[in-house]
Image (cartoon, coloured by chain):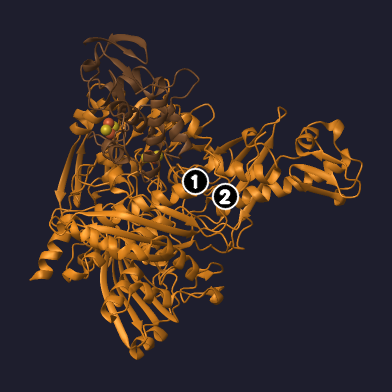
Chain colours: A brown, B orange
């Protein structure tokens, strides 16, 4: 079993895990970070998205071993302590979630979208969320939320 | 203190956990000593099952138990119940209902039917062992098309059911309708299909079962929409009393009907948990979900519209074949029969209507309600035939519709389908939708599209639907010493935000701070009854139960207030969270009355601490009728057949709006699913082999973020219903009724110049491109 060490939400994690362990399994199972969701088996839904070195990654499509030496942020690690991340706030303010199952992946993808494009427009968001499925909201409130969240991030110098 | 009234866009309480990853979905729950189950499913649509050899699989690492159909039957368990409200054929005889067990018994009848249940130490081990189970299948000829299934010579799915026929059904006045057709100036006929789709909640189904040998009680955490009804169903299967099963739904990641049914896996899990003395978890994967979540729609209809010379509607006649799959499932026979009959004709004034249908078995995954369950089908039927009639008669489709809407002064009215339409103003809602859609600027937009090589089309689709689901609901309120209270309701949110809207109603009625109210749902120990989620019923019956409970609390609280003020209950008025003596003007706050209600010393002699704790049941007598109007503008690229919805307007009459934020969310989500039905989604079985062709998210197209247009919406609140104390009409399914006809008719409007008159849903680029090409020749 390969030994892996990585950082998850700023904390060091190391251990020996079966070679076939997926990153989402490591997070959900071994580390009990169940905010990362699994909604499919063909890497289509995006419910499992986490940030790896700041990039959005479908954690169902990455082996835990591939995250060796890297920095992983899950939804549990996005907020700075008690204070919510502006993208989290924006999702609540704009009613951008219903069942909440797609939400962690949506928020993390959106944070990366905002950081990757200081002039993020609605169409960029709609395109940028292509790999994230939501069956509840009809997406429009998600797009509104991402626009607002990105603006707040810019204002806080997080972009 | 924050006070939140009815009608306020209160932000959701539940979001705090979902946006931080702290929600608890069933797969997030774990247990000490947990075992994992895998369902071995039939790879064949129709096959006799001979010997099942489990010896090799049993010997594999970690395998704990394997249950086959023969093992199951040997336990003496009962079949799963069917609860369709329609139970008889037209001739009065009972519907044909084959027995349904959690595992196939001797024969598999659809791809994905459970054949064996494997429990192991890990999910991977259970799956590996599943692959090692040897099943002798003898393949039979399959039939997946309902029209073929009832044709002579079709393969029989059930030996004792002739013609794969479940039941037939009729509603309305056949003679009067036929007569109207004979006398009609025009008759327009359209054959169309509401294609088979599936709900695809992003959280797959799953459950954890536990058995406590000391108490003999079972516990089931299940991603279900309906804990009480399914508790009764599972208990019945296992021959235990419902009290022996504690059924809980944790956070559920969407349902839309597909998590409502009595599914096979939970009874298997419960049995395995008892047998092994260990908790057992099962989570469906996505590909299995396409095979084994119930499907929806799947109706083929012939719709006929009779009009007089001036375009006034005289009669509507619809004949439907409803595919219900291989079994009756939970309420499968209801949807294509009464479920689709009630709202025939939509919001139009029809002197006569007749609806008839046949429900038919095929070698496919069974059908059960999917968001709307019959009403979207009916809405699509009427709106398509009206659009076609306008085209054929050379009348503007907007005018033809306006002319035939039920006038406001014709309400209350019972439609020829027996639907009690008590309130609304359809012409007003229709007119407002038109206004919002900027008809004046349309010609210019058409021109702008043309310049880019695109065809632009517009359609308007008024709809009338109705609520459904269990008519009864319970709400309970318990007060604690620290000033907080708990509200428990038997209806259930799978994303709709009841944790906010229901406390909002209670807080508004009692004048309390919403932050003090915690909410409990979906737990058979929290409420004595519960109708779960379905039929847009929550506010109508659940919300009304909360109001009923709140009013009882106010009644009791008046006695306490009177005692505290040395007055009499009759002299107590209640407003803004305070009880006042109408004679002396002395008052006491509800918080103080609640505090007093928990101390014997401050109570009248005949009352006891905790006396304000209240449980109330509301029972609806008549279903209400949500209605409204959708309008869509689309652009079609004639070169590629690609459609983009570019404008969308909606006015909905849901009666009183409790929380506009949540109501809008329901509408947008419903429109997205309706758009999926109109343009993208279809469950396809191979007609020869019966294999599921669209069995993954790669083959089954869900709407994505860039498929949805910006939507402008308003609520018409001037006609609340008197059928419940809140005046609400139900909001959850309306989007699915309005969107498919608005979008499909808009596309066909765009293609009118090409001579295209009809394309079956989903209107994919290939189909549109082909229709244009064929119309040319
Ligand atoms: S779980 Fe669906 S993309 Fe990863
Ligand atoms: S909120 Fe339910 S899937 Fe997005």
x, y percentage for residue A136? 39, 44
Determine whether the residue tagged by mark 2 lies in a helix, strand or loop.
loop
Residues behind callouts 1 and 2 on a single chain: yes
The residue lying toward the viewer, choosing from A153 and A94, is: A153
- Residue under pointer 2: B658
Q: Is residue B711 above or below residue A116?
A: below
Task: Identify the residue at image location x=22%, y=45%.
Answer: B695
- Residue under pointer 1: B662
Q: Chain of mark 2?
A: B
Q: Quadrant of the N terminus of chain B?
A: top right
Which quarter of the picture shows residue A63? top left
Residues marked 1 and 2 touching at CB (< 8 Å)? yes
Q: Decide if residue B80 is in sight here.
A: no
Q: Quadrant of the C terminus of chain B?
A: bottom left
Residue B103 shown left or right of residue A136 in the figure: left
x, y percentage for residue B278? 41, 25
Q: Decide if residue A146 is in sight here.
A: yes
The residue lying toward the viewer, choosing from B708 and B304, is: B708
């Amino acid at each position: 079993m390969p030994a892996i060490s990585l950082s998850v939400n700023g904390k060091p994690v190391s251990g020996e895990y079966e070679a076939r362990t997926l990153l989402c399994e490591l997070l959900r199972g071994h580390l009990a970070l169940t905010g990362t969701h699994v909604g499919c088996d063909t890497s289509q839904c995006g419910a499992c998205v986490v940030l790896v070195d700041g990039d959005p990654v479908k954690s169902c499509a990455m082996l835990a071993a591939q995250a060796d030496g890297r920095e992983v942020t899950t939804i549990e690690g996005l907020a700075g302590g008690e204070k919510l991340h502006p993208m989290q706030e924006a999702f609540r303010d704009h009613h951008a979630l219903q069942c909440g199952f797609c939400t962690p992946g949506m928020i993390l993808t959106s944070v990366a979208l905002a950081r990757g494009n200081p002039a993020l427009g609605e169409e960029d968001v709609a395109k940028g969320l292509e790999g994230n499925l939501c069956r509840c909201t009809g997406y429009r409130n998600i797009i509104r939320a991402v626009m607002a969240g990105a603006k707040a991030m810019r204002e806080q110098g997080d972009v | 203190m924050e006070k939140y009234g009815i009608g306020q866009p209160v932000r959701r309480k539940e979001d705090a956990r979902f946006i931080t990853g702290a929600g608890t979905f069933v797969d997030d729950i774990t247990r000490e000593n947990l075992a994992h189950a895998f369902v071995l499913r039939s790879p064949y649509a129709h096959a006799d099952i001979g010997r099942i050899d489990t010896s090799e699989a049993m010997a594999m690492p970690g395998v704990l138990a394997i249950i086959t159909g023969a093992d199951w039957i040997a336990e003496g368990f009962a079949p799963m119940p069917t609860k369709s409200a329609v139970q008889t054929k037209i001739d009065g005889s009972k519907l044909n209902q084959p027995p349904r067990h959690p595992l196939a018994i001797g024969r598999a009848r659809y791809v994905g039917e459970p054949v064996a249940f494997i429990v192991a130490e890990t999910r991977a081990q259970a799956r590996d062992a599943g692959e090692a189970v040897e099943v002798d299948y003898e393949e039979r000829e399959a039939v997946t098309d309902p029209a073929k299934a009832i044709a002579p010579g079709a393969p029989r799915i059930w030996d004792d059911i002739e013609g794969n026929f479940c039941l037939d059904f009729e509603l309305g006045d056949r003679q009067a309708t036929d007569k109207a057709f004979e006398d009609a100036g025009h008759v327009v006929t359209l054959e169309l299909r509401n294609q088979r789709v599936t709900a695809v909640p992003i959280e797959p189904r799953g459950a954890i079962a536990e058995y406590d040998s000391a108490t003999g009680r079972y516990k089931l955490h299940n991603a279900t929409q309906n804990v009480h009804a399914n508790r009764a169903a599972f208990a019945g299967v296992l021959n235990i009393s419902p009290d022996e099963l504690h059924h809980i739904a944790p956070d559920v990641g969407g349902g839309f009907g597909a998590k409502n049914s009595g599914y096979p896996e939970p009874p298997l899990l419960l049995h395995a948990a008892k047998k092994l003395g260990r908790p057992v978890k099962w989570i469906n994967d996505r590909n299995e979900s396409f095979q084994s979540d119930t499907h929806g729609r799947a109706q083929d209809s012939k719709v006929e519209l009779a009009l007089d010379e001036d375009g006034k509607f005289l009669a509507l006649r619809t004949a439907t074949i409803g595919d219900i799959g291989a079994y009756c499932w939970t309420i499968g026979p209801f949807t294509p029969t009464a479920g689709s009959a009630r709202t025939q004709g939509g919001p139009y004034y029809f002197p006569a209507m007749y609806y008839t249908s046949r429900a038919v078995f095929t070698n496919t995954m069974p059908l059960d309600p999917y968001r709307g369950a019959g009403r979207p089908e009916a809405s699509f039927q009427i709106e398509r035939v009206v659009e076609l009639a306008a085209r054929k008669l050379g009348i503007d489709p907007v005018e033809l519709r306006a002319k035939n809407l039920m006038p406001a002064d014709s309400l209350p009215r019972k439609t020829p389908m027996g639907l009690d339409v008590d309130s609304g103003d359809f012409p007003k809602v229709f007119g407002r939708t038109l206004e919002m859609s900027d008809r004046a600027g349309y010609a210019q937009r058409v021109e702008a599209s043309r310049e880019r090589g695109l065809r632009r089309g517009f359609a308007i689709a008024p709809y009338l639907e109705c609520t459904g689901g269990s008519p009864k609901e319970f709400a309970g309120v318990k007060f604690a010493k620290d000033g907080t209270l708990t509200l428990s309701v038997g209806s259930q949110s799978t994303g709709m935000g009841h944790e906010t809207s229901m406390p909002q109603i209670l807080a508004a009625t009692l004048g309390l701070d919403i932050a003090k109210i915690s909410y409990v749902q979906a737990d058979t120990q929290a409420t004595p009854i519960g109708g779960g989620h379905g039929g847009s019923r929550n506010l109508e019956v659940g919300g009304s139960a909360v109001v009923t409970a709140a009013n009882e609390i106010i009644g009791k609280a008046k006695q306490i207030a009177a005692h505290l003020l040395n007055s009499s209950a009759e002299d107590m008025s209640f407003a803004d969270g305070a009880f006042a003596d109408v004679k002396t003007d002395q008052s006491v706050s509800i918080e103080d009355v609640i505090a007093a209600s928990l101390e014997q010393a401050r109570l009248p002699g005949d009352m006891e601490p905790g006396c304000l704790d209240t449980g109330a049941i509301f029972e609806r007598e008549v279903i209400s009728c949500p209605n409204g109007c959708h309008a869509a503008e689309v652009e079609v690229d004639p070169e590629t057949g690609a459609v983009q919805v570019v404008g969308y307007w909606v006015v909905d009459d849901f009666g009183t709006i409790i929380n506009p934020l949540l109501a809008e969310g329901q509408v947008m989500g419903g429109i997205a699913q309706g758009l999926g039905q109109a343009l993208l989604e279809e469950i396809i079985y191979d007609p020869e082999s019966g294999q599921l062709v669209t069995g993954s998210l790669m083959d089954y197209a869900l709407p994505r973020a860039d498929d949805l247009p910006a939507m402008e919406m308003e609520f018409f609140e001037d006609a609340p219903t008197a059928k419940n104390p809140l005046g609400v009409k139900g909001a959850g399914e309306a989007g699915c009724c309005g969107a498919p006809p608005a979008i499909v008719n808009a596309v066909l409007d765009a293609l009118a110049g090409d001579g295209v008159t009809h394309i079956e849903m989903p209107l994919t680029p290939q189909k549109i491109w082909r229709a244009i090409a064929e119309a040319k020749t």
